[in-house]
Image: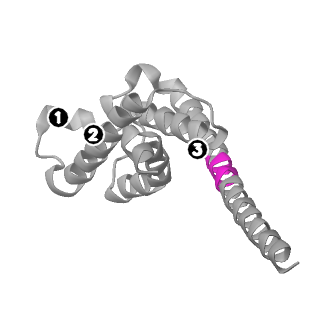
Amino acid sequence: MRHILLVYYHVFSISSMLTGAADHMYYERVIWKIAFWAYLFIVVVGAVSMVSSIFRWSIADGRGMLEGILLVLGVFELGFRRKVFAPKIWNVVFVYLIIAWTLDLFYIFFLRNKLGIVNSIFETTGSPTTSSNVELAVLFGLPGLYAIYQLTSTSRKKK
């Protein structure tokens, strides 16, 4: 009788651990789904507000729209488990975002108004680009960047 209770105890503890892990993954996916809808809302509102000036966009406006769409797609793939791009593509997107955001921060803090024509790469046409705007954009994008990191092949190999 003792052996039966011991086996039952181990089976029950393993199943409860598995259920806990499944619950954790479920809640994590729910959080990513909420993040997806938040990102989608902000990107759509930003795109709608920029439609009227689409022919006057600077390179920074186009880059910002592209980065927003990539963040939305990355969070979508992670939250809804739908394949959008291969892990190698996500790796390229991840490296691109790291480099672009690092250059944005470096430009806004050190090189602003010192580069002449290169300013069009970093300056938007709608509102003046300030350090707080760039900082908020990068901070807002960090969860999406983490989602894209989760989709890269290097992070999947570690699991």
In the image, taking residue 122 as reference, residue 151 lies left or right, namely right
Looking at the image, is mark 3 or mark 1 earlier in the sequence? 3
Residue closer to the observer: 136 or 77: 77
Please give the residue where the numbered disc 1 appears in the rendered image.
Answer: 118
Residue at 36% across / 52% down in the picture?
134
In the image, taking residue 85 as reference, residue 15 lies left or right, namely right
Instruction: Give the image location of residue 147, x and y in percent.
Output: 49, 47
Question: SS of the residue at dot 2?
Answer: helix
64 drawn magenta: no
- Give the foreground label among 2 and 3: 3
Colour logic = one colour
Amino acid carrying mark 3 in the image: Tyr
Residue at 62% across / 49% down in the picture?
32
Please give the residue where the numbered disc 2 appears in the rendered image.
Answer: 122
In the image, taking residue 30 as reference, residue 65 lies left or right, namely left
Amino acid carrying mark 2 in the image: Phe
Q: Is residue 32 above or below residue 24?
A: above
By secondary structure, the bulk of the magenta-drawn segment is best described as helix
